[in-house]
Image (cartoon, grey):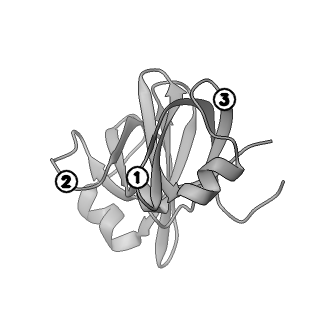
């Protein structure tokens, strides 16, 4: 499957918790990192999401909030931390590539002004904050 989402993260379903309408799914990405997604209960059941099942997540590069260094406490369910692999500066936006603990890469699009303010460079520690509702799940 091809999509316009820059981030395709693969993992194994760690936990599934149904609510009245929505379901919380925790995807183990490896390296001690988990990604939490909130999907409709119907979608979770249609996809057959259960502990141990292989799944993938899509996250558009423009959705995460990027912080340099350790992440502060926030309401975002996902804090994926790693090392800045590369920064590609554009006239308006900059693309930051993070290498996560498990080896996966996460691309985050920020404004060029934010890049300058953060002073990001390869080798810096950084974290991406992602709302659980900004994660799209799929299975093969």
Q: Which residue is mark 2?
A: 74
Q: In the shown orientation, is residue 91 left or right of residue 66?
A: right
Provide the secondary structure element on which disc 3 rests: loop
**Looking at the image, is mark 2 or mark 1 nearer the viewer?**
1
Q: What is the quadrant of residue 136 in the picture? A: bottom right
Disc 2, disc 3: CB below 8 Å? Answer: no
**Quadrant of the frame with the C terminus:** top right
Q: Which residue sits furthest right?
A: 1
Q: Determine crowd level at label 2: few under 14, some 14-19, many 20+ residues with C-alpha closer than 10 A.
A: few
Per the model, the C-alpha gap separating discs 2 and 1 is 22 Å
Q: Is residue 38 left or right of residue 78?
A: right
- Measured as percent of width and height from the top left, residue 50 is found at 60, 33
Q: Cβ–Cβ below 8 Å for labels 1 and 3?
A: no
User: Which element type, helix, strand or loop, lies under badge 1?
Assistant: loop
Q: Which mark is residue 19?
A: 1
The CA span between labels 2 and 3 is 29 Å
Q: Is residue 122 visible?
A: yes
The residue drawn where x is 56% and y is 26% is 103
Residue 53's disc is 3
**Does label 1 or label 3 sit earlier along the sequence?**
1
Label tally: 3
Q: Quadrant of residue 76?
A: bottom left
């Amino acid at each position: 499957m091809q999509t316009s989402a820059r981030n395709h993260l693969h993992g194994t379903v760690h936990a599934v918790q149904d609510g009245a309408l929505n379901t919380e799914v925790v995807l183990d990405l490896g390296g001690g990192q988990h990604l939490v997604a909130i999907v409709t209960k119907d979608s979770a059941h249609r996809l057959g999401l259960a502990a141990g099942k292989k799944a993938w997540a899509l996250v558009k590069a423009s959705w995460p909030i990027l912080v340099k260094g350790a992440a502060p406490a926030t309401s975002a369910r996902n804090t994926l931390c790693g090392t800045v692999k590369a920064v590609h500066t554009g006239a308006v936006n900059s693309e930051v590539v993070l290498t996560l603990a498990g080896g996966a890469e996460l691309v985050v699009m920020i404004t060029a002004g934010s890049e300058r303010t953060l002073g990001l460079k390869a080798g810096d520690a950084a974290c991406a904050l992602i709302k659980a509702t900004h994660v799209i799940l799929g299975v093969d």
